Amino acid sequence: MGVEVGAEAARSRAVSVLRVRGRAVGVALAPAAVAVVLLVGGATGRLDGAGWDLARWIVTGCALVVLAAAAAVALVIARARPAVSPTVPVTERSAPDLYRLVRDLADRLDVPPPSAIALTPDCDSWLEDRTPPVRGRASRGDGGPPEGDLPGGRATVGPVLVIGSPFMWWMRVAELRAVLAPVVAGTGPSAHPDIVAARRFLRGLDAAVAVAAGTDRGPAYRASLSGVGLVARMMLRKCGGPAADMERCVAAAAAERAQAVDYGLRIVAQEQVGLAYAGWDRLLTRVALPAWRMGRWPARLDAGVVSALTELSRRDRLADGFTSRLGERPACDLLEEPGAMDESVSLLAARLFHGGPAEQNPAWSPVSWQDYPDEVVDRKWRMDAARLHRVLDGMGVGPSADPSETSAQGPTLARVIDHLTAADRLTAVDHLAAGDHLTAVDRLTAGDHLAGPGAEGHRAELTDLADDGGRGTAENPAPETDNTPRSGAGSNAGPATGPPTPGHPHYSPGTSGTPEEPRVPDAPPLPGATPLPEEPPALDAAEPLGAPEIRGGQEPPSVSAAEPGAPSVPVLPLPGPAEPPAEEMGDDDLMGLDDESDDPVEDDERTGALAAGLTAELAREEAAAPAGRPAPLAGQATPDSLWDERMLPLFPHQPPRTARELLTEHVTALVCCAAVDTAGADPGLDWLDGPSLVIDGERTTDLGPRVLSLVVDGDALPLRRWLARFGIRPEKPVRLV
């Protein structure tokens, strides 16, 4: 009963839409009807006189003008090509099992089956009317049979069933049948002549508006089409309400009819719809987009959805149990060649979401998931690192002032860290983290520069790291300096007693005018300092940063408060709620930082010029890109195309990056290059987060907050500690492309 009520309501709304068309026809014929009456009255002698003759001429002229305008509008509406969703056609020969499933479902629902099936790179399914604008027996380009030759002797072309490709790879056969049931049930109301005519009229009006708005011909042609567009838009506004009600009634009738088929399974399958949508969006934005920007397109996006959702099920307890379905038959088995179909859908996705070319070429080639880490991730990191150093060269930024880098040749990470580190953050702690050892005077005077929020923690860390007094160990001996007795002829010479100069590797502003204490191997620690249970080895610039015992993830022990002998420095609280330090924040904790309206990177002189240089360099590279490389608004519309290619990309998948995001991305890429070149790390692919750094077989997840601390706050200490923990040498040159 509910099905019949919904169908009747849809038909009544369709009649309302057609009534608008009838009124428009009546308005166009009204002047002609008045002219006919006047002409007949004059011919019969009932309307004689000079006044009636003048009226006949005026009305007849107006009627001819109105009829000509109405004929022009009707011709444009009839010949305009309606908008068609970009899809990959699926012929019955390439998927006989899928066509059999859909026809069996239509028989169970007692509705006519769809005329054809197509796949789209989207998490949705719908019926689409693709009746040709010109009546005839011409074959259609979607793989369906020609008009008039449909099975069952039907004389009209049925709608095309469009299925989201992620559903085919993630869902099981039974789940796909349950999800498609309400969609296929919509072919019943859609077969009514009034609904078919109303939809065709609406699609013609929409196409006429697009033709009037998108013409690129002469001014006279545009002026004439502007009138057509005005009339079409006016009728669309009149039809808007009844058309929306008609579609709602059709959907309600289809949902009511589909309750008789797999209703319980459909409730469970709807959970997979939301999960597939989340995995598909994550895969496009985090994994596919970096490859598209480099002129590569992943050839197995739908297969990647399965891997991404499986990884999500492994990480998320809410998704636990979804992978148990993987033992059942997947819906992609209904295709004869799922790999070839996946490649076609992947190329279409790159075209829609990024604006890439329609066919592959040397500058637009596919990439497999096995080659993704080496051909996309590693290459992207090195391209970003090379761009970052080119901008620094253009700014005239010199090499790092780190004394351990004096013999290094080539681009280094230390150069970028020194440039981004704020002047008030260049304390003795940074020199110690870079490989320097502090004297007793350094340790006492460094507290003068550790003021502000977190000063107590920095002072505690300073004393913790320098507590060995430069003694060193057998594995990491203390380096020879000007204050360390040397073997040989110069071993008896006394140590230098003057203060360090600005060029000295151990120079600190706090030691100005203060004689430096001689550094001896057995120098005692600070008076009153609390000894640590396990003393960390001294960091040596001649040895790789990070000893083997801490490379597995153990961090050197540290204290949470300053030693009793440390100078008392007042800590000024920051306004607003307190936030955890950057090194304790995860990647998810930084999501809210991107919502700030003011970008601190653009307002900071230290990073603003570098971010502006990166933006300009990227713009120059995009402008100089070859013609075959994907670019926005690529392609031209042709008479045979089903959709206007001048609007590509139809769905831009990511807004432009801010200065902070751009600079953070390039610094992170340089850090990853240094990790690969100096610490044996590997580029990796995370199905949910995209390019990732793999160290000792594990994916790193704590690099982002440390890089952001350097870029936004100018604090290099969290990043230097992270580099030392994994043995990454920032002073060593990295390989660029």
Image (cartoon, grey):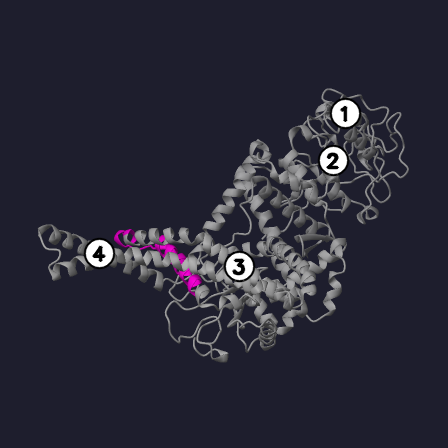
Mark closest to the chain's N terminus, 4 or 1: 4
Q: Earlier in the sequence, mark 3 or mark 4?
A: 4
Mark 3 or 2, nearer chain start:
3
Percent x, y of residue 81? 39, 63
Res 403 quadrant in image: top right
Distance from Cα at disc 4 to Cα at disc 1? 99 Å
Relative to 456, does residue 201 appear above or below in the rendering?
Answer: below
Observer-nearest of 651 and 391: 651
Residue 504 location (% of width, % of height): 70, 30
Q: CA distance from mark 4 to mark 2?
A: 82 Å
Specify the segment rendered in magenta. 197-223
Q: CA distance from mark 3 to mark 2?
A: 53 Å
* Residue 447, numbered label: 1
- Residue 397, image x, y percentages: 57, 37
Q: Amino acid at mark 4?
A: Val
Residue closer to the observer: 609 or 704: 704
Q: Which residue is mark 4?
A: 34
- Asked if the residue under mark 1 is in contact with the one under mark 2, i.e. CB atoms within 8 Å, the reply is no
Q: Please name whichever residue, 565 or 278, is drawn nearer the observer in this view of the structure.
A: 278
**Circle 1: element type:** helix
Residue at numbered disc 3: 249
Residue 297 showing in the rendered view: no
Pointer 2 or 1: first along the chain: 1
Q: Residues within 10 Å of mark 3 (few under 14, many from 20)?
A: many
Magenta stretch encompasses residue 727: no
Residue at the (51%, 60%) spot, across then down? 9
Whole-number angstrom distance, CA of label 3 to CA of label 4? 40 Å
Q: Nearer the viewer, mark 4 or mark 2?
A: 4
- Which numbered mark, 4 or 1, is in the foreground of this view? 4
